[in-house]
Image (cartoon, rainbow, N blue to C red):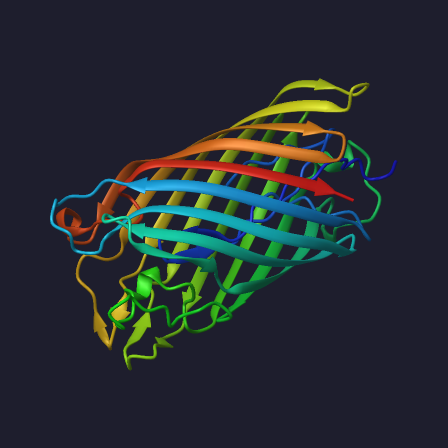
Amino acid sequence: MKKVIAGGLLSTVMMFAHHGVASLGIAGLEGPGAPLETTSSAMLPKGKFLAYMRAEHISYTLNTSAYDEEMAKHQYFTYALGYGVSSYFDLYLSLPYFTKKDEGNVGTSGFHDLKFTGVLGFKYDDGFMLTPENESLDDLEDWHFTSFFSLSLPTGNSNIKKLDGRLYDYGLQQSFASASFMFGLSATKWFGDRITLVFDGSYNIFLEGRYSDGGTMEFGNEMRFNTALAYKVYANSDKKLRFDATVEANYLNLGRDVENGIAQEATGGDILYTTLGVRVFYQNISATIGVKMPVWKDLNEESLQQGAEGNEDTRVIFTLSALF
């Protein structure tokens, strides 16, 4: 039987405050499901493209009423294109567009750093092997895995200035001003017709960036562990329609930012999120909507942190993708 992936989903280059990490995956009308934030291990069909758009709105709870240029809200748009080079290797190119505003509704908008991602797929069936080109539904119940690596280049503008000629805060710039690297692993297990479990782990490394005012910033590295359950609620093969519900646990360990060689107070810490989502597949199109909420946090100097991970008031995510 040909591989039965008929619709696509890609979750990629999610930017939280000034940080980012890639989460990759596809899913279809038949076979395993894929969550919103956790990386699925399904591969793109060989020779197929995946076009993807992700929109995210985030508002933050601010701890002080003083105007101190803390970020109050973000709107993120990510545009990506994936290609199935082979049954076991995919390439992705993604470009995010960010709007970042502080509590005075002042901020920046523009395209951020370009990111390249490679994904290697493999499975376990009486031994490890690269993901084959043809798999039956029974084959899709085997454990599937991916390893992935991303490189972002500082193509965005890191020299955006205020009306008085001073640079905006480095976190409000539209670039990390240096390269970043991310590597990770995912695992996916499909149980029968309806339930899919997905796990992933990744580590994102930010190099020190230098800005036009002479300052430097090394954003805190990120370590993530995610687990998710996707449940097929409804499917109609004649109408080529499917609805899934997903629930996820998303853990983030965030390092301190280092500005001008000094580790910054009130940055970094540990956060556990819950993400609830609904996905619809229709023919070769997939759309999702989800809400991501912090349920536990242990932030460094927590009472002083504002406009950063763990302090979300609202985080709503929408994605749209098409396989062709």
Residue 282 location (% of width, % of height): 72, 28
Q: Nearer the viewer, residue 248 or 52?
A: 52
Image quadrant where one finds the N terminus: top right
Q: Nearer the viewer, residue 156 or 303?
A: 156
Q: Residue at x 34, y 65 (%)?
A: 219
Residue 162 location (% of width, % of height): 29, 66
Q: Residue furthest right?
A: 1
Residue 156 location (% of width, % of height): 48, 67
Up-down: is 313 above or below 110? above
Q: Is residue 240 left or right of residue 98?
A: right
Q: Residue furthest front?
A: 163
Residue 297 location (% of width, % of height): 26, 42
Q: Quadrant of residue 237?
A: top right
Q: Nearer the viewer, residue 134 or 34?
A: 34
Q: Residue at x 20, y 65 (%)?
A: 264
Q: Residue furthest bottom?
A: 214
Q: Nearer the viewer, residue 269 or 112?
A: 112
Up-down: is 59 above or below 92? above
Q: Is residue 246 left or right of residue 140?
A: left
- Residue 194 visible from this viewpoint: no
Up-down: is 274 above or below 212? above
Up-down: is 307 above or below 34? below
Q: Residue at x 66, y 42 (%)?
A: 26
